[in-house]
Image (cartoon, rainbow, N blue to C red):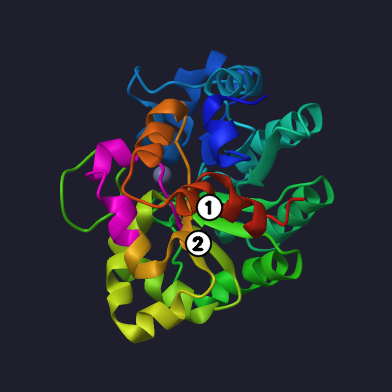
Amino acid sequence: MLSSVGIMFGMIIDFHTHIAPPWLRDKRGEYIERDSCFHLLYSQPKAKLVTAEELVASMDEAGIDKSVILNLGWVDHQLCVETNEYILESISRYPDRLIGFCSIQPKAGEAAVVELERCIANGIRGIGEMRSDVQGFDLADAEVMRSIVEVAVKHNLVFLTHASEPVGHQYSGKGDITPQILYPFIVNFPDLKLVCAHWGGGLPFYALMPEVAAALTNVFVDTAATPFLYRPQIFKEVGDIIGADKILFGSDYPLLSQRRVVNEISSAVLDEGDKAKILGDNARRLLSLP
Ligand SMILES: [Zn+2]
């Protein structure tokens, strides 16, 4: 569907949304007890869970053409598998609207690789939103990460991780995947297409250092939850440092409405071409969409 924003900027792709299966929403309390990542993100009753249908309805309303649907960093491998199943089901129901990312628990070893390959065979395009801090693995540990990254690179997947600043206000779910944690992972696996969510927790600012800029060749940031985190100036400042080619519009829906983040981008101090890149062109290229 074409919204006025779509007419101005072409295809709009939201790189950061979350959906949940109806069975999870129905037994929310039980899963809050069972998994510490789910507990961290959803123990507050006001944290909304939406189904694929609800997401697509909200996309129609906001004029979003496609959304990347992310899973969560479940601690329990089996819960990764069960919720991935809903992501797979949803992309098969809405193949033109939804792009699926799966969740894995790298600590599960071979089982995590098997699950990743199952998801790839069923059309998954990436991994995320990963939460190494809560899931209890070390992104910097090349031994743990190598088998996962090899499969990801081989199949041209995108790896999306949560990220946050080591400074500033606390919020529930902030965690500590800071630039200091992200950087060794980036250096260990330069060929991996990596998206650091929420502006990479400030990582782009370090790209004023030439060696960091060089290391970020395959690294992108998304704008998920921007109005909660940064002044609107962030779009121009980060665009100036790492280039607007590296910024992906993401809303973090249903935490925030897509409209709210789209409006910030539309009214940012950026040229129209850069806005179009952020709102969809960069995502289209990264995901090799037609
Ligand atoms: Zn996040």
> At which x and y percent is residue 131?
45, 51
Mark 2 sits near ligand 1, with its Cβ under 8 Å away: no
Mark 1 sits near ligand 1, with its Cβ under 8 Å away: no
Q: Which residue is mark 1?
A: 277
Q: How many marks?
A: 2
CB of mark 2 within 8 Å of CB of mark 1?
A: yes
Position of the N terminus, as image quadrant, is: top right
Q: What's the magenta region? A: 221-238
Q: Which residue is mark 2?
A: 245
The answer to which quarter of the image holds residue 78 is top right
Q: Is residue 287 left or right of residue 242?
A: right
Q: Amino acid at mark 2?
A: Asp
Q: Is residue 133 visible?
A: yes
Q: Is residue 81 visible?
A: no
- The residue under the point 58% across, 33% down is 6
Which residue lies most toward the bottom here? 211
> At which x and y percent is residue 226?
33, 41
Q: Dot 2: what SS?
A: helix
- The residue under the point 50% across, 58% down is 195
> At which x and y percent is residue 96?
76, 34
> At which x and y percent is residue 83?
64, 34
Q: Disc 2 to disc 1, how far (Cα)?
A: 6 Å
